Image (cartoon, coloured by chain):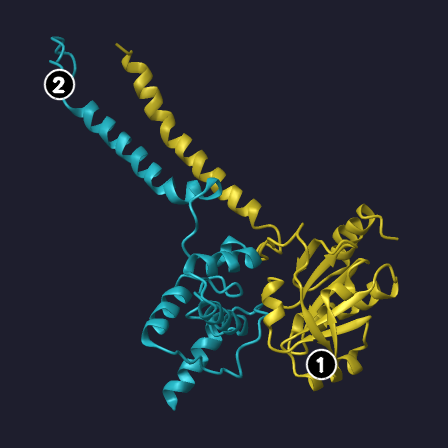
Amino acid sequence: MSAPGSRSARARWLPLIVFGAILSLLAAGVWLSRDPDRNALPSPLIGKLAPAFVLPVLGEPERLVSGDDLRGAPYLLNVWGSWCPGCREEHAVIEAFARTQRLPVIGFNWKDEPEDATRWLAQFGNPYALVLADYDGRAAIDWGIYGAPETFLVDGDGIIVWKHVGPMTDAVVRDQLLRQLDRLDIR
Amino acid sequence: MIRALLLAILIGLAWPPDARAQVAADATPLHFESASEERRFHRMVAELRCVMCQNQSLADSNAQIAHDLRREVLELMRQGMDDAAIKSHLVARYGAFVLYRPQVGPATWLLWFGPLLLLGAGGVVIWRVVASRRPDRPLPPDDTETW
C-alpha cells in the first residue's frame, strides 16, 4: 500500500510537469520556425538524375536544347520569369555569381511571354550562358518546380546535388552554393 | 458584376503576399470526354495539394502551377495511368507533400496514430481519477478524518 504522502506529492507536481511539457512544445515550435525558408519544400529529386527535357532557346524557337546536351559539365539552373518579383530581387546576386565564371548559369524561363522575357533581360542584364524557354510549363513539372525563383545545382554526371527555393541572396551563395562547389571540387 | 468584383477582392485578400506563382490569366478550361472521366478527375484533384499555396487542394487553387498540375493529371489519366500511379508520379517530383492524405509510414506514424495515443492517455488518466475516487475500500475505522 502506497503512502498517502507520495500520491499527494505527485498530484502537486503534475500541473508543473504538464506546464513544462506544453512549454517545451511551444519552444520547439518557435525553434522550428526560425528558418526563413521553412515553407520551401524539400525536393525529392536531390541526389537523382536531372529529368530529361527538350526545350527551345529563348528568342531562337527553332534551336532545341536537351538535357543530354548539357550533360558532362556542372551547371546552375536558375528558374525565373519576368512576372516574378523575387527574380528581380535576386538578379544582382545571380549576375555577381555568373561573373565569377565558376560554372555556367543556365536560365530556365518559366511560363513567360518570349517578348517579356527578352525585354526583361535587355533591361536588367543577361547573366545567363543560355536561356531555355518553358512556355507551357510541362518540363517544369518534371523538375518539381512550383514557384519562382528556384535554383538547382547539377553536377557533371547530371545529378541534382542542391536546390534553393526563393530568391538567391549573398548569404545563400556564400553559405550553401559555394560550399557545394567546394565539395564537388568545382573551381 | 458586383459579386465578381467582391470575389476578386476576396481572392486577392486570401492570397499570401509572398506567393511567387503566377496567377492564371489564360485559364483554358479543361474538356472532359465523359462524365466518369470528369468525376474521377475531380476526385483526384481534391486529394492532391497545390504545392504553391499549401492550404488549398489542386481543385481549389487558382495559382498557375495548380492549372498546370491539373492539366498534367488529366493527361496522365488519359495515358491510362491508375490513381496510385498518378499520385506516385507527382510524389516523385514534389514529394509526399502533394498528397492531402499522407501515406502511413515511419515518418507519419505520429501523425496517424498520435491522436489515438493522446485519446488513450486521456482515457487512462480519467479512469485512474475515477477509480481513486470510488470508495471501494471500507473507510478506516479512524474517525479523525474529516471528509
> Which amino acid lies under the numbered mark 1 shown in the image of this protein?
Ala
- Residue at the bottom extreme of this rendering: B1
Measured along the vertical axis of the image, is residue B145 above or below residue A42? above
Query: What residue is shown at x 67% (from left), y 50% (from top)?
Result: A47
Circle 1 chain? A
Q: Which residue appears at 79% of the width and 69% of the height?
A: A92
| Residue A83 - label | none
Q: Are marks 1 and 2 on the same chain?
A: no
x, y percent for residue A111: 62, 77
Q: Amino acid at mark 2?
A: Asp
Mark 1 is surrounded, within 10 Å at the Cα level, by few (under 14), some (14 to 19) or many (20 or more) other residues, namely: many
According to the picture, the residue beneath numbered tag 1 turns out to be A117
Q: Nearer the viewer, mark 1 or mark 2?
A: 1
Closer to the camera in the image, A130 or A116: A130
Position of residue B85 relative to residue A32, above or below, is below
Seen in the image, is A1 located left or right of residue A160? left
Looking at the image, which is closer to me, B22 or A37? B22
Residue A156 image offset from top left, x and y in percent = 79, 55
Q: Position of residue A39 (x, y in %)?
A: 56, 57
* Residue B23 found in image quarter: bottom right
* Shade representing chain B: cyan
Element under disc 1:
helix
Q: Chain of mark 2?
A: B
Residue underneath mark 2 = B136
Query: What secondary structure is found at the residue carrying circle 2?
Result: loop
| Residues at discs 1 and 2 in contact (Cβ within 8 Å) | no
Check the image and name the residue furthest to the front: B80
Residue at 53% x, 83% y is B25
Q: Let me know if residue A17 appears in the view.
A: yes
**Residue lying at 57% horizontally and 45% vertically, measured from the top left:** A31
Q: Colour of chain A?
A: yellow
Residue A11, relative to residue B21: is it above or below? above
